[in-house]
Image (cartoon, helix red, strand yellow):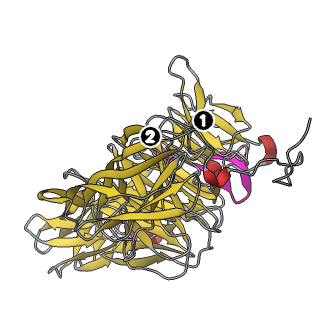
Amino acid sequence: MAVSKKEIKAFVSGTHNLIDDELIPRDAASESLGWLTKDGRIELMYGRQAHGDEGTAGKMYGQHVGYKTDGTAVFFRKKDTIVQYLDGDTWTDIITGLTASDMTFTNYSSLAGNATYITSPDDGLFKIMTANPGSYADMYDSTKNFKGFSFIDKGRMMMWNTADDTTGLYGSHIDAQDSDVYTTVSAEALAAVETGTLAFKAGGSTRTCFAVEITDTSSGEVFSDNYDGTLTGDSGGTGTINYMTGAFTITGQTGAGTADYQWVDDNTDGVTDFTKSATRVAGEGFTVRQDAGGDAIKVVVPFDGSYFSFKANSVYKFTLNVDDTNPTNELFLTNVGVESLRSAVGTSSGIVFLNTGNPSKPVVNILERNPVGDNFNTRALFPQFKFENYTYSDVLVDSWDKFIIMGCKEDSNENNRLLMCDMREKTVDVAPYGIRTSCKDDGFLYGGDPVASTCYEMFTGFDDMGLNVQNVWTGSGDHYGKPDALKKTKKFRMRGKISPDQSIKVSVSRDNGEWQHVGTILGSGDYVDYNTSYAIGTIYIGQDTIGGGDSISAYTFLMELKVRLSKFRKRQIRFEAEGMGYCAMQSVTDWDIWEYENRVPKGYRTKQNVSLDGATTDEASPTY
């Protein structure tokens, strides 16, 4: 009996690998790698390109973007034992001789300028003025602060997992940004304005300057601070200032002069001063205990006015009141937790974290404000995905575009997969990329390699560092709604978009059998409509027809693939892109379907007269 056709009109479900492939949506993947569910189609994921010079063996322990006052991005990274910044296309050393361990980076903007702070339990606390990324100050002072992981929020540094205390949460002074912490220098004598160093630095290595104004007394020209490391004269002259070191240059000036400026030392009532009075007053440093279970605080995430400390088996919630004198510190959740520093990320909706409180059943949870109450609750995300297929001992959780990205391991000692969890469409797809650190700028995602000293611009171009993007998409176990009947299909009709140099291998498996190559979709095929082209961007983000950046042309194809398949109860279809270039599948139709008797598929049939223990077949007929 002819059943005519069964059509997948759009691909919207992503990967459903938790339950049997016969029970998932017809358009879902039972497994997938390198294909992204997007706008009703599945498309081959974009590739990766090196961000800066490509490295050799090594590991990324931190990655960050700071910003100058004019908005210029400054990229930092911790590679092995070195902190570097990207100077053009070259990663340039800043701090050397560190331990090979994780570091946290955080930005802070104040009247004293834009700075990036770098901290770790092993190596201490460092400050870099982003206008002068090649210079730094070692801010660690055992009488003033600690070594640990940190971020700055509301003018205060929050620190945890310090070298000597893994279960305490620490807060610094609140930066007042006034004359209590800023020192003004007026008419400092300069022997020459052509080049020199301001005197403030001699008084303390942790000081930085700002609001610099240098006057050439011979010409009367005044050079004012642009707050981005440059000086501009009122007669058109130019100069530079290093806020960290105090070194300055004025082009074309040879006479003496004076300097007016301010300087600050963050270790005195600033964001790196964790001291407090015997009777603490508002705005000073503090320490709170979060000792339940005795396990270390892994990561702290600010959300909705509170700070949530994630440990291996519990979560604490710490809230400062408005006057900074009467905080609350509570054990908020038990039997949930995370494994590592990058296991949680704050979003506008809540804190998304990889919950490994039950190690055999990892779950992606979101901690969010209860919409009908005054408290918070947690719920599981993406219940259709089998997260236990991966391991998360070094997991990376971050937000990008509409996704939560999760770097994890599949049969590997290092991260080699990136889960793309679409918060808007509630889908999960798997990218074949291994990263353990990440940062974002202007909509772009950057990732750090776990085994090579290379950072990547992610989802850019159509090749993975010169190689084909590793990929496979395997569909559902489709029995056309008749699970007991045997069927045959004679044709597949497929529609999508493809670039001329790309091709897609199509394979079919019947009743969990071997994969049979049944045809190939060619970007150069006669079934490709070259009369209408689509501009496909070479980067994932952007406002072009599809994607952004430079564009290539892709074309619609509609092809009919005749197949010779024996009878089956269910069939699965598989796509594999074989070249470099864009391709996407928009619909698949099983055409000319015939239905036969309700029988077990041939490969599952056994001979009759089976012994009671099931071990012997073809016995004589039993008598009763």
Q: Which residues are magenta?
A: 152-171
Which one is in front, 123 or 355?
A: 355
Q: Quadrant of the N terminus?
A: top left
Tag in front: 2 or 1: 2
Residue at 75% in and 51% down: 607
Q: Is residue 228 left or right of residue 245?
A: left
Does residue 441 appear anywhere in the picture?
no
Q: Quadrant of the C terminus?
A: top right
Is 61 situated above or below 156?
Answer: below
| Amino acid type, label 1 | Val
Q: Is residue 587 left or right of residue 471?
A: left
Q: Position of residue 471 (x, y in %)?
A: 45, 63
Is 369 situated above or below 561?
Answer: above
| Amino acid type, label 2 | Met
Does residue 140 appear anywhere in the picture?
yes
Marks 2/1: CA–CA distance: 42 Å
Residue at 68% in and 48% down: 297
Q: Residue furthest top?
A: 372
Give the labeled residue for mark 2. Answer: 423
Helix, strand or loop for disc 1:
loop
> Residue 318's quadrant in the figure?
top right
Q: Main secondary structure of the magenta part?
A: strand
Give the labeled residue for mark 1. Answer: 281
Q: Is residue 87 left or right of residue 251?
A: right
Which one is in front, 591 or 419?
A: 591
Q: Position of residue 9 (x, y in %)?
A: 33, 40
